[in-house]
């Protein structure tokens, strides 16, 4: 996956009112140096991000992504993003996206230590080919996140509900899953509550109901999961956010990992135990997720 375009953003205050923020954007060579060596995003992972799927030049679920960016900024004590400016930055980046599937990544950093703050930029990359994951599914293992389900409320400084740049643990979890012979991981709490995958939400079908772990447990509220629920409701299905035991995943009638770029990948096995797959519904979900949505 090669980055094609980068856009530096001079962050405006959240209450700044103007119709056109183009003067705050600076297109730059994505292969050229652009950040200071004192940049805290690279030194400490001190920042937040969003990855937005783009289909044929249309950025998907922009509203939910911007809402989550603002939520992450609040949790991390970063300046509130100006929603008009960031929407215009997304529109500018989307003009650089080729036909097919791409990814726009938004980054808001605390900036340079003892220097200007914050810093921000957007990048455009070609999306990886996830066709096999969407059609053949993925196997997962459950991994203990090392904290109980009360940790997010008891220790908000852990930033468990924020989409931060500190993704080393998430990537380590995926590597551990590979070591165990699986494609991906699903986190559970130390007291046995089902959470999410390192880079995806989890949706389960239980009988005629579709459920996902409630975001209040320090889980990112998945933008694609919101879209999946909207589609399921439009088809007459019942959907719900619930606190689920870790055992619910292996007992589900079907389950999916859903995310902005991979879209809906059916889970075919959990900790070595096979899980039923609904091929027809999976195909319907991915057809819907490839249609334009704001």
Image (cartoon, rainbow, N blue to C red):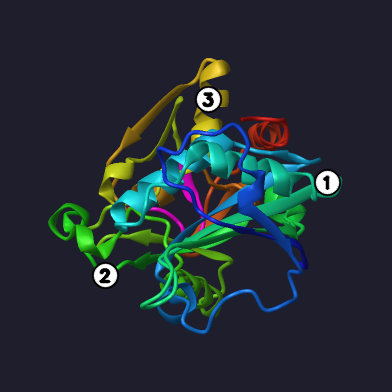
Does the magenta run of residues contain 7? Answer: no
The residue identified by callout 3 is: 230
At which x and y percent is residue 64? 50, 36
- Residue 24 against residue 204 in the figure, above or below: below
Total count of labels: 3
Disc 3 element:
helix
Q: Nearer the viewer, residue 154 or 94?
A: 94
Disc 1 element:
loop
How far apart are labels 1 and 3 at the CA level? 24 Å
Answer left or right for 59 relative to 96: left
Q: Nearer the viewer, residue 142 or 13?
A: 13
**Dot 1 alpha-carbon crowd within 10 angstroms: few under 14, some 14 to 19, many 20 or more:** few
Sequence-earlier tag: 1 or 3:
1
The residue identified by callout 1 is: 100
Sequence-earlier tag: 2 or 3:
2
**Dot 3 alpha-carbon crowd within 10 angstroms: few under 14, some 14 to 19, many 20 or more:** few
Q: Nearer the viewer, residue 261 or 248?
A: 261
At which x and y percent is residue 177? 50, 72
At which x and y percent is residue 74? 31, 50
Question: Could you tell me which residue is drawn at 74 percent across and 45 percent down?
Answer: 94
Sequence-earlier tag: 1 or 2:
1
**Dot 2 alpha-carbon crowd within 10 angstroms: few under 14, some 14 to 19, many 20 or more:** few
The residue identified by callout 2 is: 146
- In the orientation shown, which residue stands out farthest toward the bottom? 37
Q: Which span is picked out in magenta?
A: 194-203
């Amino acid at each position: 996956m090669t980055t094609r375009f980068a856009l530096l953003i001079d962050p405006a205050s959240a209450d700044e009112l103007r119709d056109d923020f183009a003067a705050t954007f600076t297109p730059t060579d994505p292969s050229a140096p652009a950040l200071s060596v004192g940049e805290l995003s690279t030194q400490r992972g001190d920042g937040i991000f969003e990855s937005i799927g783009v289909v044929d030049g249309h950025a998907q679920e922009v509203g939910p992504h911007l809402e989550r960016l603002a939520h992450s900024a609040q949790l991390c004590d970063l300046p509130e993003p100006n929603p008009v400016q960031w929407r215009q930055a997304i529109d500018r980046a989307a003009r650089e996206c080729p036909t097919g599937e791409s990814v726009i990544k938004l980054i808001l950093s605390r900036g340079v230590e003892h220097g200007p703050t914050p810093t921000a930029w957007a990048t455009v990359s070609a999306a990886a080919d996830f066709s096999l994951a969407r059609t053949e599914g993925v196997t997962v293992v459950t991994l203990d996140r090392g904290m109980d389900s009360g940790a997010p409320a008891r220790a908000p400084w852990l930033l468990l509900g924020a989409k931060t740049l500190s993704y080393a643990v998430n990537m380590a979890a995926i590597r551990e899953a590979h070591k165990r012979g699986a494609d991906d991981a699903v986190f559970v709490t130390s007291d046995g509550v089902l959470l999410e995958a390192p880079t995806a939400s989890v949706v389960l079908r239980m009988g005629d109901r579709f459920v996902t772990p409630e975001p209040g447990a320090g889980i990112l509220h998945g933008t694609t999961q919101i879209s999946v629920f909207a589609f399921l409701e439009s088809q007459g299905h019942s959907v719900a956010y619930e606190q689920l035991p870790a055992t619910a995943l292996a007992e589900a009638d079907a389950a999916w990992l859903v995310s902005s770029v991979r879209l809906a990948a059916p889970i075919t096995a959990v900790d070595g135990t096979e899980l039923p797959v609904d091929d027809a519904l999976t195909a319907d979900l991915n057809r819907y997720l490839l249609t334009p949505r704001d």
